[in-house]
């Protein structure tokens, strides 16, 4: 029986970029290569090392050729990913690690490559931040390219596709993605990957619907078969029947009609019907995202995560490198404001070629500001660059993981030192640069009234606040069912933070994932949050909810929620209410 005879095979994965696509399949790089493993003689070691070095050189040439071949402007801005890949090839943990392994274990290059790659990838698994953790896919990609060169396997023929196709792959690397003619790509489907893998980020920023994490789908399909991707729900349908085809065609038309309408209204202010104005901003990782967030109606950058600046290099970023990035950011966002968060990374997993941290509990360890106050030179380099960039736009500094007042006082002393230094050198900066803190540790939430006296704003990081309050590791799927933004303890903490901020007349924002979920919008308004910073895709929807609500009803809903004894009860009430009020959005 031909695959085409089986209709409506439905698969459920993770929708990472919204939209509905009906198209033809084009598969790439579906099958894994078997790794040859053999012991070698002492006298063959130089030859084996030479083979490896040659394979690495060839990989570099291939990557440079891919980069030079990118003609499309939209894709060019992502070509930095290829630079990251070239850096990985040069990294000593990778390059020397493999050469040492060949010599020490007397094994062939392919085997040594496999062992070292697995070790580096395992080190990455311990990284707290989901975005950085996903960077292991870059290492796997590079390793696979070197492996192909070692065993003489050609690249998949992916540069030429005819007409619009849906790309189906085991794992689509960023380099694969940008060498495709993206004008011909209608959607992406992959076996593995998550919301924060590079390809997902790229798909979102290019507006191409994508579903990932579909198990073994790449082995079950043939080129030319028909496929439907529903990036909103994470659903993929192979060989749809006429009935499903028609249904998705009308869903697709409806989706794009709504998108257009929502986007058209996304530039209107987030003001309730009874005149309460909220600020809606975007969370970003790359300056490249700025044009897209502005298109989606962002009124600024509420969280610029700077971790990627560190991970994308094989050395610690210099002050000048930081400065150019921040200057570019504030200039592009101006006159709107950009909030730059200082480094939030844990342990000594700071740069790629360091040994992994030995900390048993990295989330409770030397993370974020704790690390910065220990490694002061790293912190000062970043701060100096931020202060220098402040002369070029509307910038705020935000410090993550504050747990008590001492940290703030120490940071302020360092900032004073930096300001004095810049003044001495006659380097311009904004003197009254707002300095705020993330409130994401329960201790900080409880003493928010004390902290509010010393900073210019708060931003609530619910991703961490929930993790620490409910004692659930945010990266452990075994306890993810306990992750409840509506847990009474979390709501009480948020309320306490808002009261503390408002009694000192400082702004309180919220930049955790909770801000992007339409279901929580009224609750957050009712709590009195002044600004929400979120995934840019969510902005039009959230603004739309706010513009169709009153502050009064948000407060009423919150009163009911506060009477609930647990998150489940609260969730049921809110879901029911929000679906009734916004059936077209929720
Ligand atoms: C948070 O903790 O809610 C937050 C926004 O920061 P991150 O997810 O980067 O820890
Ligand atoms: Mg956080």
Image (tube, helix red, strand yellow):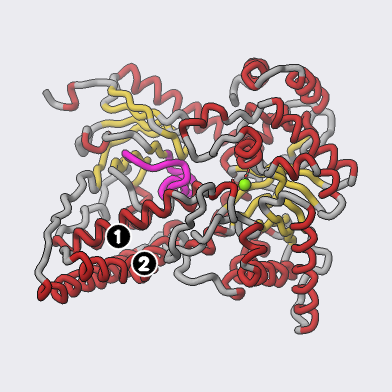
Q: For numbered disc 2, what is the local secondary structure? A: helix
Taking the spot 35% from the left edge, 32% from the top edge, the residue there is 22
Mark 2 lies within 8 Å of ligand 1 (Cβ measured): no
Comes first in the chain, label 1 or label 2: 2
The residues bearing labels 1 and 2 have C-alpha atoms spaced at a distance of 8 Å
- The quadrant where residue 549 appears: top right
Indicate the quadrant containing the C terminus: top left, top right, bottom left or bottom right. top right
Taking the spot 77% from the left edge, 74% from the top edge, the residue there is 417
According to the picture, the residue beneath numbered tag 2 turns out to be: 93
Indicate the quadrant containing the N terminus: top left, top right, bottom left or bottom right. top left
**Is residue 288 positioned above or below 561 on the image?**
below
Numbered mark located on residue 116 in the image: 1
Q: Nearer the viewer, residue 349 or 391?
A: 349
Taking the spot 80% from the left edge, 60% from the top edge, the residue there is 409
Is residue 134 located in the magenta-colored stretch of the structure? Answer: no
Q: Nearer the viewer, residue 105 or 147?
A: 105
Residue 81 in view in this figure = yes
Taking the spot 40% from the left edge, 60% from the top edge, the residue there is 72
The answer to whether the residues at label 1 and label 2 have Cβ atoms under 8 Å apart is yes
Q: Which residues are magenta?
A: 190-209
Q: Please state if 373 lies on the left or on the right of 239 as rendered.
A: right
**Is residue 239 positioned above or below 179 on the image?**
above
The x and y percentages for residue 506 are 84, 47
């Amino acid at each position: 029986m031909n695959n085409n005879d089986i209709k409506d095979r439905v698969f459920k994965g993770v929708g990472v970029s919204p939209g509905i696509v009906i198209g033809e399949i084009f598969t790439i790089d579906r099958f894994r290569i078997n790794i040859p493993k053999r012991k070698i003689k002492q006298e063959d070691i130089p030859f084996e090392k030479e083979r490896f070095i040659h394979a690495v050189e060839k990989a570099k040439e291939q990557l440079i050729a891919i980069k030079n071949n990118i003609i499309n402007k939209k894709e060019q801005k992502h070509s930095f990913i290829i630079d990251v890949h070239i850096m990985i090839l040069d990294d000593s943990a990778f390059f020397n690690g493999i050469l040492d392994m060949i010599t020490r274990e007397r094994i062939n290059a392919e085997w040594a490559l496999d062992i070292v790659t697995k070790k580096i990838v395992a080190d990455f698994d311990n990284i707290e931040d989901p975005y950085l953790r996903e960077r292991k896919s870059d290492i796997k990609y590079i390793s696979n390219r070197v492996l192909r060169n070692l065993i003489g396997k050609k690249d998949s023929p992916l540069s030429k596709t005819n007409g619009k196709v849906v790309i189906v792959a085991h794992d689509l690397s960023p380099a694969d993605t940008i060498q495709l003619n993206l004008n011909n790509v209608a959607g992406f489907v992959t076996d593995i990957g998550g919301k924060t893998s590079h390809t997902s980020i790229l798909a979102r920023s290019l507006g191409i619907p994508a579903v990932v994490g579909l198990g073994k789908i790449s082995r079950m399909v043939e080129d030319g078969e028909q496929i439907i991707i529903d990036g909103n729900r994470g659903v993929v349908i192979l060989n749809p029947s006429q009935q499903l085809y028609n249904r998705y065609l009308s869903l697709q038309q409806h989706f794009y009609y709504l998108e257009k309408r929502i986007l058209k209204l996304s530039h209107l202010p987030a003001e309730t019907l009874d005149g309460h104005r909220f600020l809606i901003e975007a969370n970003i990782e790359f300056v490249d995202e700025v044009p897209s967030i502005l298109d989606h109606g962002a009124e600024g950058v509420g969280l610029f995560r700077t971790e990627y600046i560190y991970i994308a290099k094989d050395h610690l970023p210099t002050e000048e490198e930081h400065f150019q990035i921040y200057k570019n950011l504030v200039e592009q966002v101006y006159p709107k404001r950009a909030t730059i968060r200082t480094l939030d990374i844990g342990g000594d997993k700071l740069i790629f070629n360091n040994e992994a941290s030995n900390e048993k509990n990295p989330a409770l360890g030397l993370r974020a500001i704790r690390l910065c106050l220990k490694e002061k030179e790293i912190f000062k380099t970043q701060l100096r660059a931020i202060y220098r960039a402040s002369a070029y736009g509307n910038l705020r500094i935000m410090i993550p993981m504050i747990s008590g007042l001492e940290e703030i006082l120490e940071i302020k002393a360092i900032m004073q030192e930096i300001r004095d230094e810049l003044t001495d050198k006659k380097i311009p900066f904004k003197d009254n640069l707002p300095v705020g803190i993330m409130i994401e540790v329960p201790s900080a939430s409880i003493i928010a009234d004390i902290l509010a006296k010393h900073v210019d704003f708060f931003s609530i990081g619910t991703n961490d606040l929930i993790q620490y309050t409910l004692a659930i590791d945010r990266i452990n799927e075994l306890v993810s069912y306990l992750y409840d933004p509506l847990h009474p303890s979390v709501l009480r903490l948020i309320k306490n933070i808002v009261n503390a901020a408002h009694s000192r007349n400082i702004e309180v924002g919220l930049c955790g994932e909770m801000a992007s979920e339409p279901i929580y919008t009224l609750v957050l308004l009712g709590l009195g949050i002044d600004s929400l910073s979120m995934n840019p895709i969510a902005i039009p929807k959230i603004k739309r909810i706010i513009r169709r609500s009153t502050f009064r009803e948000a407060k009423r809903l919150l009163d009911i929620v506060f009477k609930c004894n647990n998150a489940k009860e609260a969730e049921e009430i809110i879901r029911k209410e929000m679906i009734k009020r916004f059936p077209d959005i929720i």
